[in-house]
Amino acid sequence: MQTDRLAQQIQFIIEIDKLKSILRQTLLVDGSRRENSAEHSWHLALMAVLLIEYAPAGVDLLSAIKMLLIHDLVEIDAGDTFCYDLQGNETKAEREVQAANRLFGMLPSEQGAELKQIWHEFESQETVTAKFAAALDRLQPVLHNQQTKGGTWQLHNINREQVERRVKPIETGAPELWTFVQKLLDDCVAAGYLNPQEILPSVETTSVM
C-alpha cells in the first residue's frame, strides 16, 4: 500500500517537471528570453517570503507559498493564457478545471484533494491569503516589464488603462504596495515603456474626386 502511494507521488513529481516547458509572455529581467511558468512560481514564492511584512493582517505565509507554487500547475495541460488575450480567457477557467482534475487526481486521494483545495482557494480569491498571493502574481510581471523597458507591453501595444485593470487586485491584496505600483506605472509611462492610452490603428482615407 505504501509502495503504491509513493509510486503515485513520484509520478506526480515527474509530471510537474513539464511546467518548466510552459513559456509565459513575460521576458526575463535581462531580456534574453521568455520566462517559464516554473520560474514564475518560484519567483512568486520567494517574493512572498520577502514581502510578507507588507501583507494585510491574517495572511498565512506558508499557505501563500503553497498557493504560489501550485497555482500554475494547471498550465501543464491548459497552457499559459496571456492576460490580455480576451478570446483565450473565455475558455481559460474550463481548461484549467479539467487540468486540475487530471493532475491532482494523480496523487493519493487525500493529498490530491488538499492540493486541489489550495489551487481552488487561490482561484476563488475569497481569503486574505489568496488575495495577497494574487497581488504578488500581478506585481511580478510589472517589475519585469519595467526592467525590460516595456517588454511585452511594447510587443502587444498595451496601455496604462489595461495594466491598471490587471494590477487592481494589488490594491486590496497588498494595499501597502499600491502606492509603489502606481508610482512605478507613472515612471514607466514617463519613460515611454508603457503607452498612456490606447493606440488606435491608423485609418487610410481616400479623397473623393
Image (cartoon, helix red, strand yellow):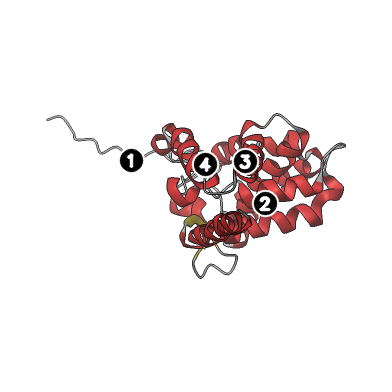
Amino acid type, callout 2:
Asp
Q: Which residue is mark 1?
A: 202
Q: Which comes before the other along the chain, label 2 or label 3? A: 3
Report how far apart the C-alphas of labels 2 and 1 lie in the structure: 27 Å
User: Horizontal placement of 57 versus 68: left or right?
Assistant: right
- Report if the CB atoms under discs 3 and 1 are less than 8 Å apart: no
Measured as percent of width and height from the top left, residue 179 is found at 77, 42
Residue 29 seen by the camera? yes
Report how far apart the C-alphas of labels 3 and 1 lie in the structure: 43 Å
Q: Which residue is mark 4?
A: 100
Measured as percent of width and height from the top left, residue 55 is found at 82, 43
Q: Which comes before the other along the chain, label 4 or label 3? A: 4
Image point (66%, 35%), residue name: 121
Q: Which comes before the other along the chain, label 1 or label 4? A: 4
Secondary structure under badge 2?
Answer: helix
Q: Nearer the viewer, mark 1 or mark 4?
A: 4
Amino acid type, callout 4:
Ala
- Report if the CB atoms under discs 4 and 3 are less than 8 Å apart: yes
- Report if the CB atoms under discs 2 and 3 are less than 8 Å apart: no
Q: Is residue 125 above or below residue 85?
A: above
Which of 131 and 190 lies nearest the eye of the viewer?
131
